[in-house]
Amino acid sequence: MNILQHLRRQFLQSLEGLDVDSSSLAGTVQPAQDPRFGDYQINAAMGLAKRWKEPPREVAAKLLERLELGELCEPPEIAGPGFINLRLRSDWIARRLVELADDPRLGVAPVADPATYVIDYSSPNVAKPMHVGHIRSTVIGDALYRILGYLGHRTIGDNHLGDWGTQFGMILYGYKHFRNEASFADDPVTELARLYQLVHRLIEYQKQKKSLPEWKRRLEELEARWAEPFDESAADKKQRKARRRLQQERDQLRATIERAEMSVQAVESDPEVASLLDNLPDLEAAVLRETALLHDGDPENRRLWESFMPHCKAALAKIYERLGVSFDYEYGESFYHDALPELVQKLIDLGVARESEGAICIFFDEFDTPMIVRKRDGAFLYATTDLATIDFRMKTWRPNVILYVVDHRQSEHFAKLFAAARKMGYTDVELVHVAFGTVLGEDGRPFKTRSGDAVGLESLLDEAVRRAYNVVATNDDAKPGGAELSDEERRHIAEVVGIGAIKYADLSHHRTSDYVFSYDQMLALEGNTATYLQYSYARIRSIFAKGELDPDAPVALDQWQWEAPIERELALQLLRFPEALEDVVADYTPHQLTGYLYELANRFHKFYQQCRVLQAESSQLRASRLLLCQLVGRTIARGLELLGIGVVERM
Ligand code: ARG
């Protein structure tokens, strides 16, 4: 049962017949900030008092008269300017806890009206090695998939692989001209990644080479203007401002030139790359040609594409397996290729798109620039594929909601995409861009390795697991009775802890904020980390082991009993698990669940410091406390599982 939802429903019902806009008032029922004032609060009286021109405390009293809370709460109290404080009855909490003991769903009832969600997540470009940015999409999408499913919704996970874009043109070109046959035979994915990076680097090189003379001419101009006599004291405000702008532009251009010259130099002095520079055609154009050939069904490029794909997919599958993530479908961009001409025709026929300067475009009132769906040369775009994808998903699954878990930098793309979909008539599906921020290095800049590439995902996981091993070993070695774990156990634990740490670090930050990637922070045994929760779980399991009790057998108890206030606080937090899950799906924010679990573990540790469990004063108290421990353990394990994170019996 979701207590908060129940209270809100009761409150809204009590408002019937009054002159209020009840839909806006649900949010005035809130968990109390301070347990001294009760467990929940209703803050509606102050606002209504203004409207009704009555004293707020009198309004609160009037609201209370109508409020029907049954056996759930103590008689409510009115406090301060008109807050209504609600305190759950302890006997009610006690009864609920006993019920939870054998409720496998921990109080989470499946929703009454399940909806169908398509979740588009991970979706990397398969020709490039996956990088740290893709973790966020994968991990957030997977958590939403699990949580929505647990709540009883129908979920369809679709990994919208980028398997058809320009990056394939790049590896096609690279493969044809620069491949190392032996490396390819030995490890195709690594060789393809090398080719991708090589071609990418050469394209950048050519762009810089081409721009440098122009930049230098411009710099000379700026320097000359700067050298002209300028009398600061005689200048007026406008002249001084222009002078500052000139200086700024000059400095920026100097820096740009310096950077470009450095990377040009790096390429030219790299023996492996320098040898390729002679007779190099315009690579950007050449790559576009390879891509177009692939799209037009050129047999050679198709054959190569088909031979690359299984390797690329296998490399991805390896990472997904390690992350414990799976998808219902992996319809990549290529899947939609044949549908694109028809789709564009349909857009034209519907009057949604029209020709403009040779291209086919969708224009919007609310955006300055149109969405191009077919270029002048006939090529289709990322957006065209995304529209075809909506078409397909609507036809195939009839979803109520489609979630796109994608980097915030694509916000404009999705805003236009959704507007275009509405123009196409898809008005009764909720399209949501579940955007997320950037992963930063400890220097506060986007996370990169020294060589400048975004860090490969695999090495990131390896490093987290390596460090987790040290944490586990140190903790184990320091145990009072000596180390308890074999090396094999330590390795297994390190994998669960290391991968969990990375995922949790990602999930525990509000998805829209950037966060700093720090191994030390994410693997801390104390604080809002997976490690802390996993450690709490193991701790609870060890209590049962010490008492020679089966940790999974429901604790038998007629009446739950408590003594210390922390026991009641812990019990209440356990009953609030359904609220945490609802909070997550309300705004697609998994950090609401990590926050909940962290608070649960904090309360547990406080409880465990203050209360004896196995040595409790009476057998009823002992059973009551064991029940608390067991429920905390189960809730942590279930909560982490819903985030895609595992637990271990011992740490
Ligand atoms: N492949 C894209 C990228 O890595 C993300 C695709 C997101 N999904 C979508 N339907 N556009 O940037």
Image: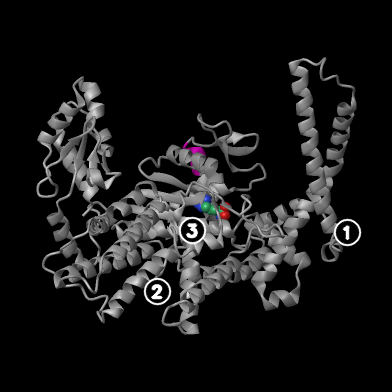
According to the picture, the residue beneath numbered tag 2 turns out to be 648
Q: Earlier in the sequence, mark 3 or mark 2?
A: 3
Q: Position of residue 221 (x, y in %)?
A: 87, 31
Work out which quarter of the rendered image holds the N terminus and state it: bottom left
> What's under tag 2, amino acid-wise?
Val
How far apart in space, not on screen, are marks 3 and 2 (Cα)?
18 Å
Is the residue marked by circle 1 packed among few (<14), some (14-19), or many (20+) residues within 10 Å?
few
187 or 614, nearer to the observer: 614
Q: Quadrant of residue 98?
A: bottom left
How far apart in space, not on screen, are marks 1 and 3 (Cα)?
47 Å
Report the magenta stretch's main SS. helix
Name the element at disc 2: loop
How far apart in space, not on screen, are marks 2 and 1 (Cα)?
58 Å
Is the residue marked by circle 3 packed among few (<14), some (14-19), or many (20+) residues within 10 Å?
many
- In the image, is 165 to the left or to the right of 422? right
Label 3 close to label 2 by CB (< 8 Å): no
According to the picture, the residue beneath numbered tag 1 turns out to be 278
Point out which mark residue 549 bears.
none
Magenta range: 346-350
385 or 53, nearer to the observer: 53
Q: Is residue 335 visible?
A: no
The type of colouring in the image is one colour
